[in-house]
Amino acid sequence: MEIVIANKSHSVYADIICQTIADAAQVRGTGIAKRKPEYIITKMENGNAVIALEGDKFAGFCYIEQWSHGKFVANSGLIVHPDFRNIGLAKQIKQKIFEHSRTKFPDAKVFSITTGLAVMKMNSDLGYKPVTFSELTTDQSFWNGCQTCKNFDVLTRTEQKMCLCTGMLYDPSKEVKQTHQHKYDKKVWTRLKNIKQTMFLKKDKNEK
């Protein structure tokens, strides 16, 4: 397995990357941002993506997005092809794109919003810490990307202050203090997720 910084030569994989992302979004029923091949190719050409390949076969992908004039970056579109799941590849891709982000944008804060416990653990292992949405980018174009999520009404209802997703942030200015300080506790994260679901989904039912 090879995980490398993508370039123009990898543009031939753009279609299968987009299809894999779309398929995963349909299965999960959550708002993974759908992208067009042209967008993925641009990320490759700009050196803002990593791709995993097994020989010539596509295995996984992730790209970097910049927000608030480069003050924030997000590692987005993390996807693993079904043929290569459950072997720890997602974690390896996440590590690679995080390191690339830190090298290319050393002063930027790296953030993530997710409902996935596996992603939360990977983020925690990399030094992210849970934060309120107010500590993330205020760039409206980022939040507009949540419109494809079935829980977008929750985000709108709370005026973008809270949703079922958990916000996580890596702040390079606090790198020494935060390294290996935030131990991942699955029980705590699961409880937080369940509380949010109960609170917001119960409200949805009462409003119908």
Image: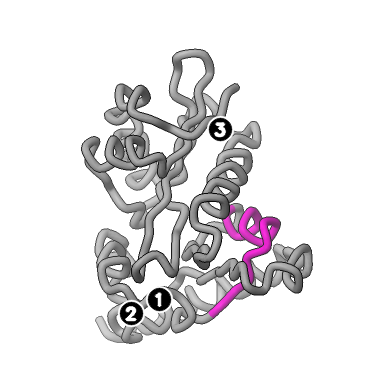
Residue bearing the label numbered 3: 85
Three-letter amino acid code of the residue under disc 2: Asp
Q: In the displayed structure, does residue 1 sit left or right of residue 32?
A: right
Give the mark nearer the N terminus: 2 vs 3.
Answer: 3
The disc label shown at residue 201, or none: 1
Q: Position of residue 64 (x, y in %)?
A: 42, 50
Q: Residues within 10 Å of mark 3 (few under 14, many from 20)?
A: few
Q: Is residue 122 magenta?
A: yes
User: Is residue 16 a member of the stretch shown in magenta?
Assistant: no
Q: Residues within 10 Å of mark 1 (few under 14, many from 20)?
A: some
Residue 48 versus residue 57: which sits nearer the camera? 48
Q: Earlier in the sequence, mark 3 or mark 1?
A: 3
**Where does the image place residue 204, in percent across and percent down from the top left?**
33, 79
Taking 37 as reference, is 147 above or below it? below
Residue 147 falls left or right of residue 137: left
- Looking at the rendered image, the quarter that the C terminus falls into is bottom left
For the N terminus, the quadrant is top right
Q: Is residue 200 left or right of residue 131?
A: left
- Disc 1 and disc 2 in contact, CB within 8 angstroms: yes
What residue is disc 2 on? Answer: 204
C-alpha separation, residue under disc 2 versus residue under disc 3: 34 Å
CA gap between label 3 and label 1 equals 30 Å
Residue 163, position in %: x, y?
42, 76
Q: Residue furthest top?
A: 55
Residue 139's tag is none
| Distance CA(mark 1)–CA(mark 2) | 5 Å
Q: Secondary structure at mark 2?
A: helix
Which image quarter: residue 200? bottom left
Q: Which residues are magenta?
A: 119-131
